[in-house]
Amino acid sequence: DAWPALLPLAGAMLRGGSTGVGGAGALVDFGGEGDGGLAARQSRHFFEHNRIDFSQALEDGFRDSGLGAEPTVAGSSVVLDRRRDSALQRFADRCRKKLRKAKDEAAQAMVLALLVSDTCGRSGVHAADLVRKHLRLASEHRHGDTGELLLGDLLGDRVTGAKRRGKHPPTGAALVPHRTLLFKALADWLGLLDCTLERRTPVAGEKPSNILHAVYWNIVLVGSTHCLVDLVFDPGALYEEHSAKAQEYRKLLAAAESEACEAIQAGGGPADPSRKAMPPPAPPSALKELAGYMPRPPWHVEPWALEIARGDRIGRGGFGEVFHGRWANCHVAIKEIKDATPTDAEVVDFMLE
């Protein structure tokens, strides 16, 4: 099952803490700031409250150890730190260049979400075997003594040179907690959007776990509307908070928890090899019957707003076909792309061309 692999597994396979800390139980030095530094306080705040608010920009040195381990104690952790993470800095620079063409807040959120998804291993059918790839990357790059893992080690931008410039550059393998952490960091660092980092709070009597129950998400402010950002099922879609679409998005994440955990327990593969892989679920953005405002760029048109006369084709080429159609009671020409499963990077290029 490919799509559950995107679910929160941060810290599930890592043991240790930060560089220079000798073993579990020791206090962590956050990039030289010491345990009382801002990054340390921010990490502890997230551990205790499961939320970093709009007004709190993520600091270099921030770390997340999941629900079950304190970030100020050496243990399983993913670290956000551009000062010693060249891959993370490269990705931030690449996003800055791409986003120059995105002029409105909705377009900025969509482009950033797609870029994050693409470098983190992509989405949908392109995210096959993500758990297995994640386990391999984590094993290869975690710190030998402490198990610390830099976020950039999970990104496609860890690869440079000719391999990166090739027709099919390597992708990363980062899971939902890493994606939400990365999205919040870039939104803060690039001054794009007011953004939160949140995860589900365990209910009464529920034992915290690094793997289970750690459903993460971001909320951004687009105009005056608070929206959940889809980084999983339809990267870039924005769902008005508390709407039926937002509830469905959280429901999909929660429903996929057990599938993701089964994949981890099976070493990154399906728990039952004889079981047929399920296709990715329909994203809330595709469910017209679900109520909820979805902010879009001014030029964006929802597919269901178009009437395509497929029997009245104007022309075709290697890229797609052009048909007569109607939109907003107007006769229009509609170009339909042949590739039904473009990568997230290809969607970004199409949006910004």
Image (spheres, grey):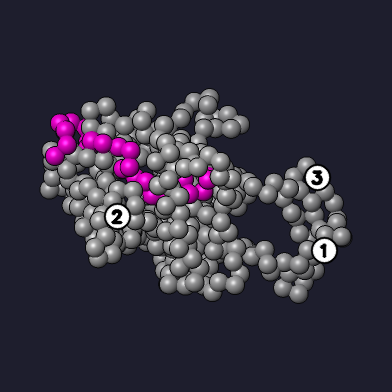
Q: Residue at x 34, y 52 (%)?
A: 212
State how far apart marks 3 and 2 are (Cα). 47 Å
Q: Is residue 132 above or below residue 35?
A: above
Q: Residue furthest top?
A: 162
Place residue 149 in its image quadrant. Answer: top left
Which mark sits nearer the N-terminus, 3 or 1? 1
Amino acid type, callout 2: Ala
Which numbered disc covers residue 309? 1
168 relative position to 198: left or right: right
Magenta residue span = 1-25
Q: Main secondary structure of the magenta part?
A: loop
Name the quadrant containing residue 311.
Answer: bottom right
Seen at 63% across and 46% down, the residue is 342
Report x, y in % for residue 194: 37, 61
* Amino acid marked by disc 3: Gly
Residue 16 position (above or below residue 277): above
Crowding at dot 1, Cα within 10 Å, few <14 / some 14-19 / many 20+, comes out as some
126 relative position to 268: left or right: right
Q: CA distance from mark 3 to mark 1?
A: 18 Å
Q: Is residue 157 visible?
A: no
The residue shown at (53%, 39%) is 273
Label 3 crowd bin: few (<14), some (14–19), many (20+), radius 10 Å: few
Rendered residue at 33%/42% (across/down): 12
N-terminal label among 3 and 2: 2
Q: Position of residue 58 (x, y in %)?
A: 29, 51
Q: Which mark is residue 57?
A: 2
Q: Which mark is residue 317?
A: 3
Residue 278 x/y as whole percent:
57, 50
Local crowd at mark 2 within 10 Å, few (<14), some, or many (≥20)?
Answer: some
